[in-house]
Image (spheres, coloured by chain):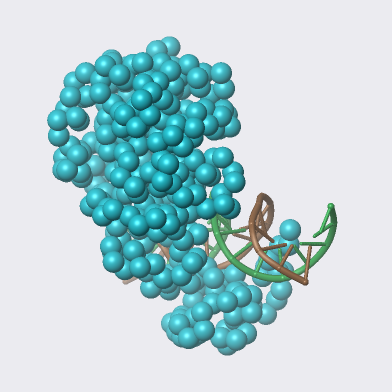
Chain colours: A cyan, B brown, C green
Amino acid sequence: MGRSPCSEKVGFKKGPWTPDEDHKLLAYIEQYGHGSWLALPAKAGLQRCGKSCRLRWTNYLRPDIKRGRFSLQEEQSIIQLHALLGNRWSVIAAHLSKRTDNEIKNHWNTHLKKRLTKLGIDPVTHMPKSHALGPDQLKDIANLNHMAQWEGARLEAEARLVRESKLKGPNPFQTQLGSSGSAQLVYEATITAPLPPLPLQPLCLDVLSAWQGSWLKAPKYNDFAAHTFAATSSSLDSLTSVLDISKKGEAMIMNAGAELEIPNDFQDPKERMEIELLQLQGLGYSTDHDDYSMATGNENILLPNFMEAAGLGDMLFDSPNQLYPSIAGENYGMVAGTCCGNLEENKNYWNNILNLVNCSPSDSPVF
DNA sequence: AACAAGACCAACCGCAGGACA
DNA sequence: CTGTCCTGCGGTTGGTCTTGT
């Protein structure tokens, strides 16, 4: 593994970029593309190392970058995604349209982290610091952590696919749908069959909105959760344990999606399953428990998307009516009123975090 | 007005890992 | 299979700006 010679060679300029340097870099990339970053500085007439040029381009000069203040929705998304993914800034950035990982990382470190800390919430675990948790709560948190692991892996896979699809060049979906998010890009990258019209998605929040997609009907929830958690309880810390479980889902999906077309280069079971899920969604299948049951006739199906199945998505949102008016209706209210107690507490916990954060804008003297 | 402290954020550093000869 | 090149990523630094005294 070679280290970039950038830091080892002398003669390269460091420090802030001047407008002239920006102009040179921009002009060169617009005309020739960046090609090899290491070769670029000499060709563009810059006294910078390639690494510095790449960073300047990706974090500042790229035309598809959104700058300026973070909106409330963006901040919510960052908090929620960070709870799932931790410091995986590139993955988080992939789900926040037009924001760079560096910008998100800075915003987290300078604003959001402090806000959570001042609210008595551990910004690493996203759990209340001083709150004494009972055994039941700890158990629920363990379950939620496990679900979060699963969802985190899924989000990361989606981000990877988005990156790959972007590398293939300008994306017609992107221009057609504006910033409507990574799910469409993933469809574009992975689906070979003609697609039905895609449902309208809230801007930038496709994955999060997916969590909102559906709740299990309350009576089925407990059976499903028991099945799920029994299967996962042997190794809560291992992602591979989750993936083992996912094979059941994979088999189920194969039953449901005879019309799927999976590229042959996705040999990895996990990756194949991710593609299959996305294709199912693209073909109009819902990935919620009931729809899978209908497709397969099996009531004991394990869903890969535990977060969605257990309703954790809704736990992360404080105001579904505001963000997702199309899905915030009967189901949301029904489940909110019928959830088992501890799950309801967890839901309240997440809601409280977001409420507190939302009620305390960045320029508030409180923060 | 001058200085200090804190906040902010662009840029850097170094490691990890994919691609390729 | 191995070594090198190159890019991507997360953590950190340090210069600049803002706020308080």
* Image-quadrant location for residue A345: top left
Q: Where residue A343 sits: x, y (%)?
A: 32, 20
- Residue at figure coordinates x 41%, y 40% from the top left: A257
Q: Quadrant of the N terminus of chain A?
A: bottom right
**Relative to A297, is A73 above or below?**
below
- Residue at figure coordinates x 34%, y 64% from the top left: A174
**Relative to A33, is A119 above or below?**
above
Viewer can see residue A236: yes
- Residue at figure coordinates x 31%, y 32% from the top left: A291
Q: How many marks?
A: 0
Residue extending furthest toward the top: A135
Viewer can see residue A101: no
- A68 sits left or right of B14 in the view: left
Q: Quadrant of the C terminus of chain A?
A: top left
- Residue at figure coordinates x 50%, y 28% from the top left: A248
Q: Where residue A147 sits: x, y (%)?
A: 43, 30
* Image-quadrant location for residue A170: bottom left
Q: Where residue A266 sits: x, y (%)?
A: 56, 49
Q: Where residue A45 sits: x, y (%)?
A: 58, 87
Residue extending furthest toward the front: A258
**Relative to A208, is A312 above or below?**
above
